[in-house]
Image (tube, rainbow, N blue to C red):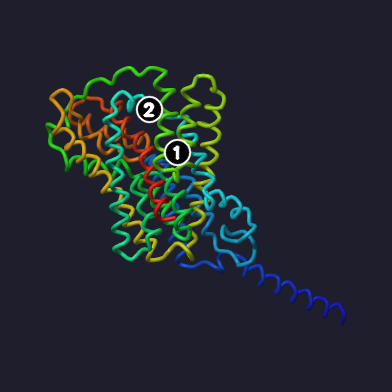
Amino acid sequence: MFSLLATGGFTDFLSTQMVQFLQYTGYANVTLGHIIMILIGLTFIFLGIKFEFEPLLLVPIGFGMLVGNIPFYPGLKIGIYEQGSVLNILYHGVQNGWYPPLIFLGIGAMTDFSALLSNPKLFLIGAAAQFGIFGAYMLALLLGFAPNEAGAIGIIGGADGPTAIFISSQLAPDLMGAIAVSAYSYMALVPVIQPPIMRLCTTDKERRIRMKPPRQVSQLEKIIFPIVGFLFCAFVVPSGLPLLGMLFFGNLLKESGVTKRLSDVASNAVVNICTLLIGLTVGASTQATTFLTGRSVLIFALGALSFIIATFCGVLFVKFLNLFLKEGSKINPLIGNSGVSAVPDAARVSNNVGLEYDKTNYLLQHAMGPNVAGVVGSAVAAGILLAFLH
């Protein structure tokens, strides 16, 4: 009799434990939203691997989406929004804006400003492309977003993921996931979005304009530029100090010629680790319960408009500038698209579209000028937004 009861009690115990185990599985907690976000994550991974659209960004973000959308029973302290979880601790670098300045340090250490220094007019193209940021800002205001939210959304137009994360962490933390994914998505889609706009805005004759070879820039100029550039920009927009300071500091490490070890660490280990963590945690932050909303869809639409406006402004500004330049000194409008901060992809697009119309007209060197100017311009624009919206 005792053995039968024992057997029956053991069976009940197993049944209870099995039911409890099933309640904790992802299958028991899955929703349609989780499935949608997992499919989006798989799409990101596919685009990154198959078409090499910014694979260093899309693959970590895509896998992060898979991680963030595994359904789980509440209270296990494993979700990215659960205080004390491993993912939550790693996400602090995004929430508190630690990763973006470190990435800017690496960008500075990898960037050669020679093309910009050899032709300072190109700096104006990088500035013109930032109008996309302020155009999207005004559109977001018209659609009912609060001023701080509109500013965070507008920065997507700079095609600069770290800056978008830094600004949204300061101005609109609740929208950070949608803004970050949108910014990185459009950075990856530069080769798809920009060429049709470039062709629409230019004539066949303009696409064939040959530019003078850039002059040789001295080592002294390269050393002076990050110091003078930092002091000038920081005095104009002190609020952009975290990004501008790290960008120009990284560039000084590169150009000084005496800090190669530090420059190598910044341009390799630091930037790679931060890119890895920022991609994974931003992807994981897109949990279906917090990400799949009408506002997220609207942010994606505004981000696309912001990016499109920036590309239009860059190309059209070059056409306007050419009205005042003599023959032989004119700028090929195809490099206007590279005023956004997607380095070096936007410059490659300028070069590739130019080669379609003249197989011997290489624009990459020239396009790198406004492209690196766009990096500085997006950081300055971020500082301006922080100054009057924070």
The residue identified by callout 1 is: 244
Q: Position of residue 214 (x, y in %)?
A: 28, 21
Among numbered discs 2 and 1, the one appearing first in the sequence: 2
Give the amino acid at mark 2. Phe
Question: Could you tell me which residue is drawn at 50 percent across and 19 percent down?
Answer: 257
Q: Which amino acid does label 1 sit on?
A: Leu
Q: How crowded is mark 2: few (under 14 residues within 10 Å), some or many (20 or more)?
A: many
- Secondary element at tag 1: helix
Residue linked to disc 2 = 113
Q: Which residue lies furthest to the bottom in this view?
A: 1
Q: In this view, does 78 lie above or below 184?
A: below
Whether residue 374 is situated above or below residue 264 in the rendered picture: below
Q: In this view, does 222 lie to the left or right of 90?
A: left
Q: Closer to the camera, 110 or 53?
A: 110
Residue pictured at 45% horizontal, 46% vertical? 239
Which quadrant of the view contains residue 224? top left
In-front residue for pair 178/223: 223
Quadrant of the image occupied by residue 190: top left
Camera-nearest residue between 275 and 256: 256
- Helix, strand or loop at label 2? It is loop
Q: On the rendered structure, is 135 left or right of 256?
A: left
Give the residue at x 27% y 36%. 125
Q: Residue at x 75, y 74 (%)?
A: 13
State the quadrant of the N terminus. Answer: bottom right
In screen coordinates, is 273 left or right of 325? right
**Vertical placement of 261 versus 292: above or below?**
above
Q: Position of residue 172 (x, y in %)?
A: 45, 58
CA–CA distance in space, label 2 to label 1: 15 Å
